[in-house]
């Protein structure tokens, strides 16, 4: 068992509460170097605090560098600027995102002690299937956070003993890189249109919450991204029409659902919740609402009341929502995290 595995396995038994500290140093070079100042103050604060928490609680030193000038050789530059990144950890556990907007390329560099957790195939896949769509939409800060989320998920799978299997997790496509990371071409802010699909008639509201969730798993499996599916509430359709949905997100959610034990289904009138055991802190509940056609997923309300922290643990931002009835028998701490029974 590696030192990383021991460290994080011990931490998984602790419920770590993550606060965004508005007083943090937005220009702290240890975690963020935004040379062209593409990020606003709130985004810099968020990423700095998020990365501090990763170092503190997962022993991973993550840094984002956004270049102002085009890199002649981004691989060589990444190796040079990587330097001693990771020296604040208990080993070579640095993780570098080097973004070159002028050269339309991104390089992710991985420290030696993380290469077993993040093999090159995984890094290339995450760049292509998660980071690129956000960057093309001009959403660098959100894209970095969403990409980091998949890295954290990979750490959690690694702790559980799940090895990265490209044949299962990447489908037929293969990803290669030069070692210890991967490079990808991306046109930042190109506003390329997402492939939305046209299966609006296939995925409709269902007769039960369980069948609706099964249909949603098929949506994820087929990488269907049409926001107008009848499987979603009207508010959710509007929400998804303005949100970047990636193959990486869909693959990660499908994998999480496939690994989870069957959830409890709790119904009250036209509202339902599918929830999972408290100990599964990375598996948030699903909210559903019944309409004339049947049960629909209410991701719009979920996005407003549920938030994930840097370890992908969920908590409630507010309990002022119509689905709270499903959690009356649970206990929560002052920050909205469910308390795991002793």
Image (cartoon, helix red, strand yellow):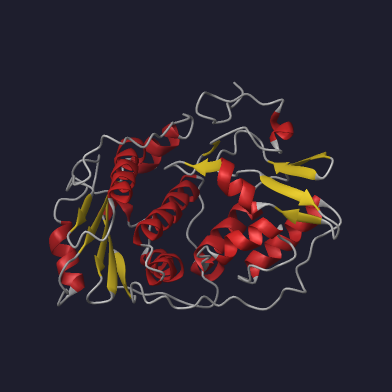
Residue under the image location 75 percent in, 59 percent down: 214
**Quadrant of the rendering where the N terminus is positioned:** top left
Quarter of the view holding residue 254: bottom right
- Residue nearest the viewer, comparing 137 with 79: 137
Q: Is residue 270 left or right of residue 247?
A: right
Residue under the image location 36 percent in, 57 percent down: 144
- Residue nearest the viewer, comparing 67 with 148: 67
Q: Position of residue 226 (x, y in %)?
A: 63, 71
In the displayed structure, 287 sits above or below 96; it is above
Q: Position of residue 327 (x, y in %)?
A: 69, 31
Quarter of the view holding residue 321: top right
**Quadrant of the rendering where the C terminus is positioned:** top right
Q: Is residue 307 left or right of residue 257?
A: left
Residue under the image location 71 percent in, 38 percent down: 322
Q: Is residue 295 left or right of residue 188?
A: right
In the displayed structure, 253 sits above or below 77; it is above
In this rendering, does residue 2 appear at all?
no
In this rendering, does residue 255 appear at all?
yes
Residue under the image location 15 percent in, 68 percent down: 77
Total label count?
A: 0
Residue extending furthest top?
A: 342
Q: Position of residue 108 (x, y in %)?
A: 29, 63
- Residue nearest the viewer, comparing 39 with 53: 39
Q: Position of residue 134 (x, y in %)?
A: 42, 66
In the displayed structure, 290 sits above or below 195; it is above
In the displayed structure, 245 sits above or below 104; it is above
């Amino acid at each position: 068992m590696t030192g990383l595995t021991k460290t994080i396995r011990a931490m998984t038994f602790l419920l770590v509460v993550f606060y965004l500290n508005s007083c943090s140093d937005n220009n702290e070079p240890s975690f963020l170097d935004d040379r062209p100042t593409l990020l606003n103050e709130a985004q810099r604060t968020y990423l700095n605090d998020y990365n501090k928490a990763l170092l503190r609680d997962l022993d991973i030193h993550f840094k984002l560098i956004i270049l102002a000038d085009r890199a002649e050789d981004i691989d060589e530059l990444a190796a040079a600027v990587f330097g001693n990144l990771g020296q604040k950890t208990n080993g070579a556990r640095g993780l570098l995102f080097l973004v070159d907007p002028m050269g339309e390329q991104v390089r992710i560099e991985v420290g030696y002690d993380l290469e077993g957790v993040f093999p090159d195939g995984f890094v290339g896949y995450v760049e292509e299937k998660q980071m690129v769509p956000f960057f093309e939409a001009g959403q660098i800060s959100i894209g970095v956070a969403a990409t980091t989320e998949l890295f954290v998920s990979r750490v959690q799978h690694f702790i559980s003993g799940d090895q990265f299997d490209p044949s299962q997790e990447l489908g037929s496509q293969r990803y290669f890189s030069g070692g210890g990371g991967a490079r990808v071409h991306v046109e930042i802010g190109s506003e390329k249109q997402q492939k939305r699909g046209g299966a609006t008639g296939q995925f409709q509201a269902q007769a039960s919450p369980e069948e609706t969730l099964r249909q949603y798993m098929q949506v994820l499996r087929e990488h269907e991204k049409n926001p107008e599916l009848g499987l979603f509430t009207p508010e959710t359709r509007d929400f998804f029409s303005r949100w970047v949905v990636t193959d990486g997100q869909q693959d990660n959610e499908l994998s999480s659902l496939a690994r989870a034990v069957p959830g409890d289904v709790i119904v009250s009138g036209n509202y339902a919740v599918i929830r999972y055991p408290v100990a599964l802190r990375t598996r948030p509940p699903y909210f559903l609402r019944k309409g004339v056609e049947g049960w629909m997923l209410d991701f719009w309300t979920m996005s407003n009341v549920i938030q994930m922290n840097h370890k992908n643990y969920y908590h409630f931002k507010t309990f002022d929502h119509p689905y709270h009835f499903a959690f009356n028998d649970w206990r929560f701490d002052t920050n909205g995290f469910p308390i795991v029974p002793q």
